Image (cartoon, rainbow, N blue to C red):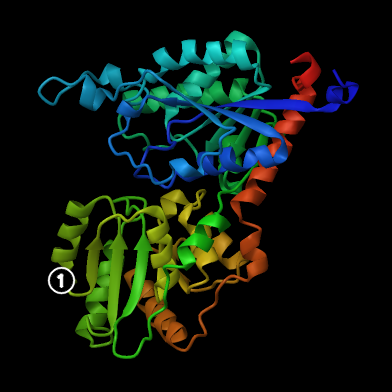
């Protein structure tokens, strides 16, 4: 064997993720998918451990083509307790602790051990928001001693989440064990790191790393072909919210109140303004709110689109709406980074002191108002519409945008994996593999 091969490094990472193609229905899939897609460019070979496809309520082949050939995907046994273990629509709560996919643990542990013995990954990586993923990683880490990078993303728990006490206790236990045993904990916002440092003062600050979410330039380049910004003359101004509208975290009640009052005063009408809630995910709840506030002529509920079509719609919209309540001040919606890349005017209805507002302001966008203030929304919306119609609404510079690209975020992760592997002496040469 050529002695030069001794210097060629095999760097494998076992990625434990619930959300992965062919799963469909959440933007949360993109973080793991893009990490897996771009990590090979930095010399890391992902091995993805996912649940069996039966665990997914919704599937799509749309993003399967984005998985590189060198990325191996290994589905493990998993059931959805609410669908597969229910009798006449009812099931035991114990079968949903910490979540409805806890059976994945029983399939993933033997599958993970087999993958570790065969492929000898240098790092175990797991990602929230499915708590069972961290439970699987915790078990594999304790059994093998392989360094573990836990992608926490946002805080797993707070005073009211999860809402059921038993589930919240299960989440708290996993959260505590994860932070105690992982080698590094990755968060998506500075606020999340601050919360965890205050909640667990015994955990060293050096354990936390910040890797924000981002957007994918390849996807936007493909989506641009289907995008066209329509001339505004004679058509209503289209303000688009693309993604789930959570009843608490993104409550549009005050927004609807503001729209109703502005319509009553003749400042907006169906002929001049249209709010599109695309893929809101809670259509019955939203429909009731729309009816209650009498804004049916101004607000349209629209079904989900394939991902690239959704990006094309963002690129074509007159304006983009971001919703984030003050109870999520430590979080930043992943959609924000796509909005910045779309370079369309953004109206942010969020707490001005939260991380979401901070990210907008850092990008040079000041069209912001609190989500829970009808009067503030009224003023902000009118100012936003005036600025947008004059082409004077602030948008992010390309310099700011490019810093949020998924490839840049993946390089940050690769550097972290390199550091963890080197500290543990886990990276091996091909000659010894």
Residue shown at 60% from the left, 67% from the top: 363
- Residue 141 is situated, as x and y percent measured from the top left of the image, at 59, 16
- Residue 406 is situated, as x and y percent measured from the top left of the image, at 59, 50
Residue 255 located left or right of residue 404:
left
Residue pointed to by mark 1: 294
- Quadrant in which residue 431 is drawn: top right
Q: 48 and 72: which one is in front? A: 72
Q: 87 and 21: which one is in front? A: 21
Is disc 1 surrounded by few (<14), some (14 to 19) or many (20+) residues within 10 Å? some
Q: Can you say which quadrant of the picture contains the C terminus? A: top right
Residue shown at 49% from the left, 63% from the top: 339
Q: 158 and 429: which one is in front? A: 429
Residue situated furthest right in the rendering: 3
- Residue 95 is situated, as x and y percent measured from the top left of the image, at 28, 18
Residue 425 located left or right of residue 242:
right
Q: Can you say which quadrant of the picture contains the N terminus? A: top right
Q: Does residue 372 show up?
A: no
Position of 293 relative to 26 (above/below): below
Q: 14 and 166: which one is in front? A: 14
Residue 303 located left or right of residue 69:
left
- Residue 337 is situated, as x and y percent measured from the top left of the image, at 53, 58
């Amino acid at each position: 064997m050529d002695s030069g091969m001794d210097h060629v490094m095999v760097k494998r990472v076992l990625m434990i993720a619930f959300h992965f193609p062919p799963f469909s229905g959440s933007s949360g899939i993109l973080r793991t998918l893009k990490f897996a897609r771009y990590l090979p460019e930095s010399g890391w070979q992902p091995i993805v451990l996912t649940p069996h496809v039966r665990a997914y309520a919704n599937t799509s082949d749309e993003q399967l083509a984005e998985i590189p050939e060198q990325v191996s995907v290994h589905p493990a046994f998993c059931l959805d307790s609410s669908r597969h273990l229910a009798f006449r629509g009812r099931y035991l709560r114990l079968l949903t602790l910490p979540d409805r996919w806890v059976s994945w643990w029983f399939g993933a542990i033997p599958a993970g051990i087999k993958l570790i013995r065969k492929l000898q990954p240098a790092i175990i990586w797991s990602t929230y928001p499915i708590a069972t993923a961290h439970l699987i990683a915790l078990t594999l880490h304790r059994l093998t001693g392989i360094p573990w990078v836990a992608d926490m993303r946002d805080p797993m728990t707070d005073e009211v989440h999860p809402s059921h006490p038993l589930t919240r206790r299960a989440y708290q236990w996993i959260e505590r064990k994860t932070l105690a045993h992982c080698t590094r904990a990755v968060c998506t916002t500075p606020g999340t790191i601050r919360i965890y440092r205050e909640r667990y003062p015994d955990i060293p600050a050096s354990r936390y790393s910040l890797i924000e979410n981002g957007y994918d330039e390849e996807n936007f380049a493909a989506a641009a072909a289907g995008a066209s910004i329509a001339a505004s003359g004679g058509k209503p101004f289209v303000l688009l919210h693309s993604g789930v509208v959570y009843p608490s975290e993104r409550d549009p009640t005050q927004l609807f109140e503001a729209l109703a009052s502005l319509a009553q005063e003749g400042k907006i009408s169906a002929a001049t303004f249209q709010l599109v809630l695309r893929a809101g995910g809670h259509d019955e709840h939203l429909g009731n709110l729309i009816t209650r506030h009498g804004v049916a002529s101004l607000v349209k509920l629209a079904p989900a689109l394939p991902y690239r079509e959704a990006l094309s719609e963002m690129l074509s919209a007159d304006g983009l709406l971001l919703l984030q309540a003050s109870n999520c001040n430590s979080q930043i919606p992943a959609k924000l980074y796509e909005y910045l890349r779309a370079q369309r005017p953004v109206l942010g209805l969020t707490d001005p002191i939260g991380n979401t507002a901070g990210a907008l302001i850092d990008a040079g966008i000041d069209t912001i108002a609190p989500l829970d203030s009808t009067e503030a929304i009224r003023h902000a919306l009118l100012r936003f519409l005036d600025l947008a119609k004059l082409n004077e609404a602030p948008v992010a510079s390309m310099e700011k945008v490019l810093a949020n690209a998924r490839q840049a975020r993946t390089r940050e992760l690769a550097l972290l994996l390199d550091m963890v592997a080197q500290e543990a002496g886990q990276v091996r040469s091909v000659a010894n593999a």
